[in-house]
């Protein structure tokens, strides 16, 4: 009984969860074949393109691959500071 | 009926492919099935040693493929203690490039045509190169062996992808060397964690067992041993391969504890993965 109690107190403190979450991250990269370098390059390109239409700060551009229900999604989080007036005018109505 | 051929593979070395092949083969043979186990690890053969048949090798896999030995049956070694169990050993002095996947495919077809075997188990070498490609050529299905370690599970994931590319879509998983004690202490991933990550069906769980070293020392697969937890696990897996529904170790074991019984009473226990 004491053993069960001490085990219960230890729950979540073992190394298992660290291992599991590291493994999940590793597998996201393995499964998509995307290295951090490629992701960085993509981030830069995205910034260039988005900057044509919006005012964004490069440091704010966050990109990551996330696992959802057995598939992998590319998730981008890019805070927009403001629209670019010039660009809006060039878009044909 | 033509037999069913499985490859036993893992990607990572040292997770117990050979031990699993030897013991599953033995367990199936003890259940009355005609079984042929093939060592495809050319240059690093070991299945013969684990099974205690190393002194009886005359011809090997490469001899059959190259035609040095023309009768398949001449190369098959019958096990002393299980007369339905046969081994086709690998060659020790050649390398993986000595045979091609196509030649392996032909050999598997020939073995099936003989009609003698209910099951053919191919023990794969570690890695994902030529040896692996040879091992999966001509099999119907795959058994992936992993241990509950990050590195082994990662490699298993890679193997699942490669098997898919080879049109083997439903491999099943054996988790080898699971320590109930470490799982209880939250220091080891259990079957739920691993299945959650790999998303394939679980074929069985084999507990960590010192007896494996003793049985390998003696050259007698542990399945021949009475009162062994891992032997019991292998026998259960063999029955599952036969299509029987058998409860998973170690849940039945774990459920005997007081806390487990209380948890079950209050519905706090986790359900076993489906299709096992």
Image (cartoon, helix red, strand yellow):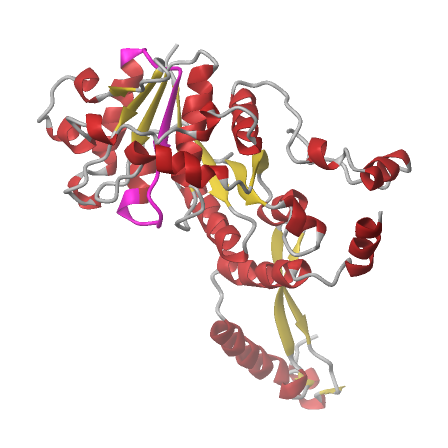
Q: Which residues are magenta?
A: B114-131
Q: Is residue A64 highlighted in magenta?
A: no
Question: Could you tell me which residue is drawn at 70 percent across and 83 percent down?
Answer: A88
Q: Is residue A16 left or right of residue B230?
A: right
Instruction: Depth check: give the residue in front, B242 or A15.
Output: A15
Residue B162 visible in this rendered orientation of the protein: yes
Tell me which residue sits at (62%, 73%) in the image.
A63
Give the mark count: 0
* Residue at the image point whose x is 39% and y is 50% from the top: B13
Task: Answer whether residue B120 is magenta in the image.
Answer: yes
The answer to which of A4 and B236 lies nearer the viewer is: A4
Horizontally, is B175 left or right of B247 in the view? left
Q: Residue at x 81, y 49 (%)?
A: A4
- Residue A14: x %, y % from top left: 69, 61
Taking the image as shown, residue A39 lies to the left or right of residue A50, namely: left
Vertical order, B274 against A14 (above or below): above
Furthest residue to the left? Answer: B68
Give the x, y percent position of residue A48.
56, 83
């Amino acid at each position: 009984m004491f053993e069960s109690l001490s085990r219960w107190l230890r729950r979540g403190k073992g190394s298992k969860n660290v291992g599991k979450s590291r493994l999940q991250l590793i597998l996201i990269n393995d499964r998509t074949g995307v290295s951090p370098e490629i992701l960085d390059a993509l981030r830069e390109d995205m910034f260039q393109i988005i900057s044509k239409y919006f005012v964004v700060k490069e440091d704010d551009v966050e990109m990551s691959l996330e696992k959802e229900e057995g598939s992998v999604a590319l998730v981008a989080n890019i805070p927009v500071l403001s629209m670019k007036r010039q660009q809006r005018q060039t878009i044909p109505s | 009926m033509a037999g069913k051929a499985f490859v036993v593979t893992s990607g990572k070395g040292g997770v117990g492919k050979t031990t699993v092949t030897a013991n599953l083969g033995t367990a199936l043979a003890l259940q009355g099935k005609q079984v042929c186990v093939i060592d495809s690890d050319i240059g690093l053969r070991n299945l013969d040693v684990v099974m205690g048949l190393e002194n009886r090798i005359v011809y090997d896999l490469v001899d059959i493929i190259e035609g040095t030995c023309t009768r398949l049956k001449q190369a098959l070694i019958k096990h002393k203690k299980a007369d339905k169990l046969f081994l086709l050993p690998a060659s020790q002095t050649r390398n993986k490039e000595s045979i091609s996947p196509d030649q392996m495919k032909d050999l598997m077809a020939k073995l099936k045509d003989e009609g003698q075997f209910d099951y053919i188990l191919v023990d794969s070498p570690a890695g994902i190169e030529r040896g692996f490609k040879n091992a999966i050529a001509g099999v119907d299905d795959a058994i992936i062996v992993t241990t509950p370690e990050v590195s082994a599970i990662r490699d298993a994931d890679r193997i699942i992808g490669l098997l898919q590319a080879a049109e083997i879509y439903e491999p099943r998983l054996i988790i080898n060397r699971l320590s109930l004690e470490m799982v209880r202490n939250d220091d080891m991933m259990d079957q739920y964690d691993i299945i959650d990550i790999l998303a394939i069906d679980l074929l069985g769980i084999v507990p960590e067992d010192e007896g494996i070293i003793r049985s390998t020392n003696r050259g007698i697969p542990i399945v021949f041993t009475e009162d062994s937890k891992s032997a019991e696990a292998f026998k259960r897996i063999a029955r599952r391969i036969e299509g029987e529904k058998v409860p998973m170790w170690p849940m039945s074991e774990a459920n005997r504890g007081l806390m487990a019984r209380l948890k079950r009473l209050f519905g706090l226990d986790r359900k076993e993965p489906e299709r096992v």
